[in-house]
């Protein structure tokens, strides 16, 4: 199977356009057209994981955390990252990362975490903005149904759990075809008036090129008139963190015990107990301290994440229980998620979840 076929499935689920600005998701090493027979899935990339891939003859490693975060000016083997890059290249192993773009989908990293913790009816804690636009185009009335269908099939018209959403307004357009044209309606050199439908659809920015291509293919006019407007709308199914509720409220101590059991966390650092039961829970796998205020404003009783600093626990302000269950521990199920995404599409392709424990934090 070609690497680009695997990438297509992953990026349909979590487009790289949804990664954070600091991130480096995508194909980091290798050629998209390269054929691979097997793929290894890991949370992190370490030399042990690369050795595992070499031993198992895996042509592709899919990692949640990128091997290369910042630019490499030279590759001489002085750092561990440089040595891993060199070894992967020598062994013809391609490397793909699917990081914050997988964090920023409802059924992504945090969706898996909420499922493991028994959080029901989860929704995005901080929805993304500035990733949507509106397409407006004009079409002869009788051709509007076909054009709308093409726009919907290309990925436009999705608003929350509703699809095929559009606004349509009938009016008329005018134009005069020049000598070097082949007009669908009207005659060269004559002013023409045509009854048309104004069609408006919302769409995610990352499909812009594809959407315009499909619109022009389905549109009867030789020259297609259209406008694109950037929007500030929130994307309810995309963004940082997640929030939902437990089936029954539980005591704070029992909630901490639940985290230790479900996540296998030897230690859970937490803020002071505030004397109320935990029902509404917000969570963010990995490093989620930037969402503390969002969790409080959303009325969460507890916020679960990792990598909390000392002073950040004070931000609880007696309003919420903050629990640091560990970066690795809150993201460990990502390997299972990636496996499930690909296995559903390619059930006969050889996929394996890495057996290496890559947790960089150890407890004594």
Image (spheres, rainbow, N blue to C red):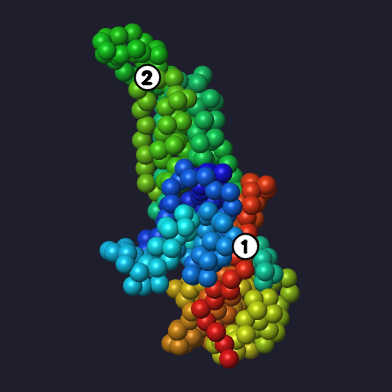
Q: Is residue 121 above or below residue 271?
A: above
Residue nearest the observer in this picture, 296 or 214: 214
Give the x, y percent position of residue 168: 49, 32
Tell me which residue sits at (51%, 19%) in the image.
142
Count residues near mark 1 (Cα–Cα under 10 Å), then give few for <14, some for 14-19, many for 20+: some
Q: Is residue 342 above or below residue 219?
A: below
Tell me which residue sits at (32%, 64%) in the image.
75
Q: Quadrant of residue 122?
A: bottom right
Tag 2 residue:
222
Which element type, helix, strand or loop, lies under badge 1?
strand
188 sits left or right of 85 in the view: left
Give the x, y percent position of residue 189: 27, 9
Tag 1 residue:
353
Point out the residue furthest to the right here. Answer: 248
Give the x, y percent position of residue 25: 44, 58
Q: Earlier in the sequence, mark 1 or mark 2?
A: 2
């Amino acid at each position: 199977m070609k690497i680009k076929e695997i990438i297509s499935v992953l990026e349909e689920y979590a487009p790289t356009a949804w990664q954070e600005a600091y991130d480096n998701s995508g194909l980091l090493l290798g050629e998209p057209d390269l054929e691979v027979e097997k793929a290894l899935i890991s949370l992190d990339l370490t030399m042990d994981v690369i050795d595992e891939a070499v031993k198992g003859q895996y042509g592709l490693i899919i990692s949640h955390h990128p091997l290369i975060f910042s630019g490499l000016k030279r590759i001489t083997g002085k750092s561990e990252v440089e040595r891993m890059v060199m070894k992967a290249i020598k062994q013809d192993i391609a490397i793909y990362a699917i990081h914050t773009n997988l964090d920023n989908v409802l059924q992504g990293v945090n969706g898996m975490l909420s499922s493991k913790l028994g959080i029901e009816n989860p929704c995005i804690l901080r929805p993304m903005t500035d990733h949507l636009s509106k397409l407006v185009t004009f079409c002869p009335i009788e051709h509007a149904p076909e054009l709308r269908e093409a726009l919907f099939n290309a990925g436009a018209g999705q608003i929350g759990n509703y699809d095929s959403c559009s606004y349509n307004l009938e009016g008329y357009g005018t134009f005069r075809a020049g000598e070097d044209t082949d007009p669908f309606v009207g005659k060269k050199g004559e002013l023409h008036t045509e009854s048309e439908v104004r069609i408006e659809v919302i769409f995610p920015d990352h499909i812009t090129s594809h959407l315009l291509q499909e619109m022009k293919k389905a549109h009867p006019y030789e020259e297609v008139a259209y406008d694109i407007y950037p929007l500030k709308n929130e994307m309810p199914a995309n963004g940082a963190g997640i929030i939902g509720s437990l089936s029954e409220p539980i005591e704070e101590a029992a909630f901490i015990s639940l985290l230790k059991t479900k996540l296998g966390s030897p230690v859970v650092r937490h803020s002071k107990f505030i004397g109320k039961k935990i029902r509404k829970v917000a969570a963010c796998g990995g490093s989620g301290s930037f969402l503390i205020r969002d969790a409080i404003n959303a009325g969460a009783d507890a916020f679960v994440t990792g990598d909390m600093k000392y002073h950040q626990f004070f931000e609880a302000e007696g309003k919420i229980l903050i629990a640091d269950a560990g970066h690795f521990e809150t993201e460990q199920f990502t390997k299972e998620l990636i496996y499930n995404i690909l296995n559903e599409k390619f059930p006969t392709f050889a996929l394996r979840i890495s057996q290496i424990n890559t947790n960089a934090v150890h407890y004594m």
